Amino acid sequence: MFTGSVDEKPRVQAISTVAPNPAPKPGKHKSVARDYDYKRMGTVSFLAGFDLHDGKIIAKVHDRHRSREFVKLLKEFASHYHKESIVRIILDNHLAHISKGTMEYLESCPGRLLYVHPPKHRSWLNMIESLFSKMARFFLRHIRVTSKKELKERILKGI
């Protein structure tokens, strides 16, 4: 039996700069400043699965956040293991996780994927949340990109 942690980080904003960043000024600014004005390029949703035994991360970035995209992640996550093995998946009760489409997929492989839901308001018990927290603090904080495509590439490169 294997255990994995799965969740998503929806609405990651692709923000681009409007004007070039002002250069540092001796005696006034030691580093490059950033203009306060920005342009929104849209949002993406980041879905990831984290194997708690070997640390492998399976990640997908999509324009939308629906059960369809979640089922794609589940399929790829399940393919990481032997077909005979049972995989426990720790995840919250988000609508995409318990939707009709997701339940149909789970019924198509009975006993293969078992959901484990942590108690409500205890998100830190899901280890994937630690990954999302590190991402938000280290390589998504104050990020500026030129397009949604660049944001997707940078998220996947960060993983």
Image: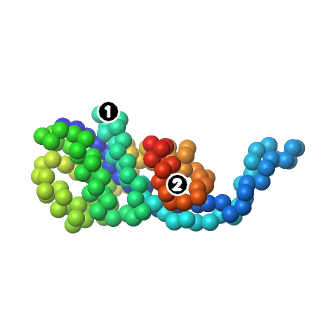
Three-letter residue code for mark 2: Glu
How packed is label 1: few (under 14 Cα within 10 Å), some, or many (20 or more)? few
Give x and y (percent) for residue 120: 34, 56
Circle number at residue 82: none
Give x and y (percent) for residue 109: 13, 52
Circle number at residue 150: 2
How packed is label 2: few (under 14 Cα within 10 Å), some, or many (20 or more)? few
Q: Secondary structure at mark 2?
A: helix
Above or below, comparing residue 59 to residue 147 in the picture: above
**Quadrant (top left/top right/bottom left/bottom right) for the C terminus:** top left
Residue 8: name its quadrant.
bottom left
Q: Is residue 125 visible?
A: no
Give x and y (percent) for residue 53: 29, 34
Q: Is residue 142 left or right of residue 93?
A: right
Residue at (48%, 50%) from the top-left corner? 153
Residue at (19%, 49%) from the top-left corner? 114
Residue 52: name its quadrant.
top left
Labels 1 & 2 near each other (Cβ < 8 A): no
Three-letter residue code for mark 1: Asp
Residue 51: name its quadrant.
top left
Residue highlighted by disc 1? 54
Q: Is residue 145 left or right of residue 106?
A: right
Q: Is residue 134 visible?
A: yes
Above or below, comparing residue 107 to residue 4 in the picture: below
The residue lying toward the viewer, choosing from 123 and 103, is 103
**Quadrant (top left/top right/bottom left/bottom right) for the N terminus:** top left
Q: Is residue 127 left or right of residue 116?
A: right
Q: Is residue 31 left or right of residue 142?
A: right
The residue lying toward the viewer, choosing from 8 and 79, is 79
Cα–Cα gap, marks 1 and 2: 29 Å
